[in-house]
Amino acid sequence: MASFKLKFRPSTAPDKTGTLYFQVIHRRNTRTVYTNYHIMPDEWDEKTSFLRIGGTPEHQAELQLIASKIQWDTKHLIALITEKELARMEYTVDDIVSAFRKMPKYQTWFCFIRNMILRKLRIGRHGTAKTYRNALASFTRFRDGKDIAIDALDTETINLYEAWLRGRGVKRNSSSCYLRTLRTLYHKAVENGLSADKDIFRHVFTGFAKTTKRAVTLDSIRVIMRLNLPDGSALAFTRDMFMLCIYLQGISFVDMAYLKKTDIRNGLLQYCRKKTGQSLSVGWEPVMQDIVDTYAHLTVGTPYLLPIITKQDGTERRQYERMEHKVNYHLKKIGEMADLHIPLTTYCARHSWASILRDMGTDLSIISKGLGHESLKTTQIYLSSINTEDLVKANRKLISKIFR
């Protein structure tokens, strides 16, 4: 019976990538099938005859994509050899190699998603890449790590996946998020001609279920603002970041993390949302400057406005995510100190800003513009007629109410 091994041939030049290849053996005859997969010597594990996954998120995505392709090739080599053996016909090692070279490449679901993750990382869409990665990880667990051809996906598989999510206690909106993400990726695969559109998501929930209220009241915000917290403590920093999120029109934490000192010009803070690229303007108020001044000594030598990202070394995304985790951890403690009945998070600041303005009678279109929403079609038609000045006035009115 024929057999094969995955091997690595290092480059003759130092610090260059080597090539992965398959060695196919049958009746003492050996053939080499080179791939177009290239890795560094320290990324090859001789003991396991497979890749070591490491490095930056972008490089990990590249290596995981190669690993997915190798698994696809391995699966088909095994299938070819098994087919020849079951047929009980004479065959040569060249027959195996020839048949393998004619096989379609990389048309698997996991491989396709990893390729899409890599594309998003290359254009700087780290948030989208993370969403894709989370959906892939969930679906991979559902499949016990077994890949599947894209055109083999069907309604039953997707229905079983939704049932599996519910069986594991995944909340309905989280389940919907995974399914919406996979549906988006499936449609991209269809657009690329990798499968016919079989409408396989038609029986699963991909909408938005009603959730527990995330907004806190104006009185609760005043309580949080007035908490007696030790200067320079993690709790004090967390409270300041929460308040700044509100002052800055419910800014998302990722956008706040990437704010730069040069974004403040002529009394306005102007920045682009990471999620959509939409440009937003916020009137710069003294309470905002007070918070920035408190932490100015921690941002010396960096272009960033706040000490969330402190180093420019390619790990900016990781720094922001770590800080967001810490802030949300301490916000839960602050919420308990303020006798809140919901878990306090940075996202509560965004909901609270919008809810308080709504209760103040602010036009919904102004709130929508302040949040940078693009998906609220019912309000988007009014946005062109809303002046930034109106938004500045509304936000200033909210801040004055907090301090009243």
Image: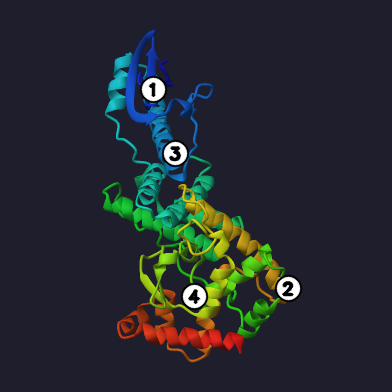
Rendered view: 251 above or below 141: below
Q: Which mark is residue 64?
A: 3
Looking at the image, which residue is at 31% across and 82% down? 381
Towards the viewer: 55 or 26: 55
Residue designated by label 1: 14
Label 1 – label 2 distance at C-alpha = 59 Å
Dot 1 or dot 2, earlier in sequence:
1
- Sequence-wise, the earlier of marks 3 and 1 is 1
Please tell me which residue is depicted at 50% across the width and 37% down the height of the picture.
Answer: 54
Alpha carbons under labels 3 and 1: distance apart: 24 Å
Q: Residue at x 49, y 35 (%)?
A: 53
Tag 4: amino acid:
Leu
First-in-chain label (2 vs 3): 3
Q: Residues within 10 Å of mark 3 (few under 14, many from 20)?
A: many
Q: How far apart are labels 4 and 1 at the CA level? A: 51 Å
| Callout 2 secondary element | helix
Q: Which mark is residue 337?
A: 2
In contact (CB < 8 Å): disc 3 and disc 4: no
Q: Is residue 259 visible?
A: yes
Q: Residues within 10 Å of mark 2 (few under 14, many from 20)?
A: few
Q: Amino acid at mark 1?
A: Pro
| Nearer-the-camera pick, 202 or 187 | 187
The residue type indicated by label 2 comes to Met
Horizontally, residue 245 falls left or right of residue 334, namely left
**Where does label 4 land, which residue?**
248
User: Where does residue 201 sit, x and y in percent of width and height?
Assistant: 41, 59
Q: CA distance from mark 3 to mark 4?
A: 39 Å
